[in-house]
Amino acid sequence: MYEVVYKSLVYQTGGIMFKKGLAIFGLIVSLQVLAQTNEQLNEKINALADQVESLKTQGLSSNLSIGGYGEIVYKKSEAGQKDTVGGEPEFDNKRFILYVGYEFSPKWKLVSEIEVEHAKEIYMEQAYLEYMHSDSLYYRVGTLLIPMGHLNLYHEPTTFLGTQRTQVETRILPTTWRENGVGVYGNIEKFEYYFYYVNGLVATDGSKDVNAEGIRNGRQKAAKANAHKGAFVGRVDYKIRENIEFGASIYAGKLNNTSSDVAHNVYDIHYKGQFGALYTRALWTELTLDQIVDTFGELVSALATFATKVPAQSFMVNQSGK
């Protein structure tokens, strides 16, 4: 900057003292302008830093969690096969899930998932308040996912093998299965556990009932749920190694909206393991409905029909005490 001013003044004046004075003046003015610009820039940076700190104080940058996933399925039956769409190709926006979580404090947290099925049906998939007493003990209350099988807790499309969920975890374990309730969850060394008390399934509500499609229609989905009779749910998993896990679950409850007590029990043993690129998974499950009276005989017939659609070792109906 100094050299440019100097040469310009030499051409115009030819006076050595005058040209040096103006050159120095021009340099001082430039430095002052530069200082003012840096000062303004620093003020803007400080203002931005204050805004970031303000957002952190409000919890919007670290306490709020937003996520989700979706699933779009194209289905076409081979010639001669029959399916729910009568053999016609089907292109379905099967589900879109929005996850929203908020950490009120290191102890209190909200977890929620809102699901849109088939682009038009909206459900609350889960929504519960969690209190962390310690790493080994969390309390939960709200709409809870029933902790059974492989898919009900973790049912994103990338967590199961194939395009469709398995029949066992659709009809016997009616994924996605959620009910209102309270419970505890935690980790103790290599063990992970869930113990919940939730409202039981409903036998019929006038528009749908437990039928040949299994117990899927008995889910109340947390919507004005009949809570006259409840169910206990327990699950314990043991991580043998980082890549191998065994566990077992039990659901013991009674159906709502029946003229007599109908016990509804489900048991499962599950395993998963990963060895390099090889992923393995196994599930054994059994369902029982006991003390079914004559007026509930239609249910027995329907369930017997359903039992022929899945492996015999996966389903059981007991009828006694007429």
Image: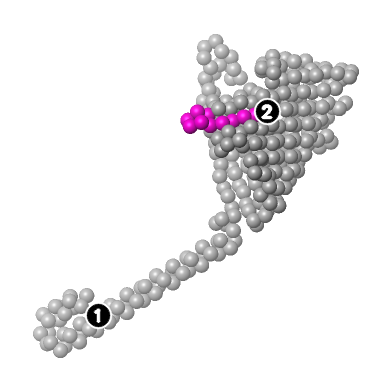
Residue, disc 1: 27
Instruction: Please name the colour scheme applied to the rendered image.
Output: one colour
Residue, disc 2: 269
The furthest residue to the bottom: 17
The relative height of residue 186 versus residue 212 in the rendered view (above or below) is: below
Q: Is residue 29 visible?
A: yes
Query: For this view, does 16 lie left or right of residue 264?
Result: left
In front of the other: 214 or 314: 314
Residue drawn 73% across the image and 36% down it: 234
The furthest residue to the top: 80
| Quadrant of the frame with the C terminus | top right
In front of the other: 196 or 295: 196
Q: Nearer the viewer, mark 2 or mark 1?
A: 2
Q: Amino acid at mark 1?
A: Leu
- In the image, the segment drawn in magenta is 269-279
Which sits earlier in the primary sequence, circle 2 or circle 1?
1
User: Secondary structure of the magenta portion, mostly?
Assistant: strand
Residue drawn 85% across the image and 22% down it: 291
Query: For this view, does 271 lie left or right of residue 143?
Result: left
